[in-house]
Amino acid sequence: MAPFFTVFIPNNKLCGTIINTLTKFYAPPLVDGISSYPQNFKDKYGGMNGRYFRFEGDDLLMFDNESIGLIVPQFLLSFDVGVKISKDDWKTVVHFINAIFKGELSDDLKNAFETLAPSPIVYKPNPPESEPSPPENEEYEFQYDTDSENDITVVEIIKPFTDRPYTLILRQFSQRGFAPLFTGLYIATSWGVCSKDYAFLEKLWTHLELQKTLGPIDLMNRLKDDINKCEEHPELEPEMYRETLDEVIEKLKKSRERKHLLK
C-alpha cells in the first residue's frame, strides 16, 4: 500500500487548509473525525509506522506516539508496517510538508518525496461494457414441425416486439390442416390488438395457399364457427403456449412418455 496522510478534524479553518494542500500536492488524505483524546490516538495509532505533525505558528512539529498527551496532532503520515524510514527520510518528509504549505516546493524536493512516498494510484474502474442489444425484429416469423406418426403439427408464430412466441398444437392435422391456427391465435389476449396481426394472417393464408381449398380467409365467420364447434366438441379447443417451438415439442414428448408408463 502507498503511504497515507490522515488529518484529524477539530472543526477549524486550518484543518481545511491542511486537507486542501495535501490533496493538491500529494493525494486526498484520510480523515479521522473521532480521535481527539490522547488515549484515542494511542489506542488507534500506537502500532503505526509513522509520525504525527502539528503547526505551531510557522513551525512544523514532528513527533511520535510517546509525545501524545503533551502535543495534540493535526495530521500524520503512516507507512506500511515493516517499511524502514531513516532519519534522513523523515527530514525529507518535513522539508516536503513545509515546502507545500509555504509555496516553496522545488522539483528536486518533489521527486525526492515521491521516491520515498509514491502517490497512491486512484483506481477508477471502467464502466461495465453493456452488451449490445439484439436488434428488435420488426417482422412476423412463422415456422412449424410436423409429427406424421401422431398426426400433429406444432406451429410457432413470433410477433414483433413481444418477448415470447405464440405456439399452437394442431391435432388431427391430416384432416384439419392449418386452418385452426388462424382462429386459435385469438385465445391470446395480446393477439389481434393491432391491424398488423390480421394483415400477417392474410399474408400467411396466401402463403400456405389455403384459398385454393378453403376460399377467402374471412376470419370473423371462421371465429364464430370454431367457437360453436368447440362448445359441442371441447377436444377441438385451441392448444396454445407462450413458449418456443422446441419447448412445446419437448412438452409433447414427455407427455407421451408419461402415458406410455401408465399403460
Image (cartoon, helix red, strand yellow):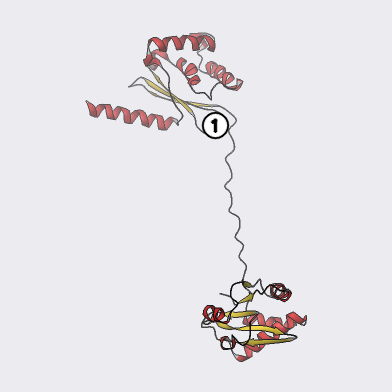
2 vs 154, nearest the viewer: 2
How many C-alpha atoms fall within 10 Å of the one at disc 1: few (<14), some, or many (≥20)? few
In percent of width and height, residue 179 lies at: 46, 15
- The answer to whether 96 is drawn above or below residue 190 in the figure is below
Quarter holding the N terminus? Answer: bottom right
Seen from this angle, which residue lies furthest right?
103
85 vs 57, nearest the viewer: 57
Residue 152 quadrant: top left
Q: Residue at x 39, y 12 (%)?
A: 175
- The answer to whether 79 is drawn above or below residue 212 in the figure is below
Residue 97 quadrant: bottom right
- The answer to whether 72 is drawn above or below residue 1 in the figure is below
227 vs 61, nearest the viewer: 61
Q: What amino acid is at disc 1? A: Thr
In percent of width and height, residue 87 lies at: 61, 91
Q: Residue at x 63, y 82 (%)?
A: 73
In percent of width and height, residue 60 lies at: 70, 86
Is residue 69 shown to the viewer in this render? Answer: yes
- The residue wearing badge 1 is 162
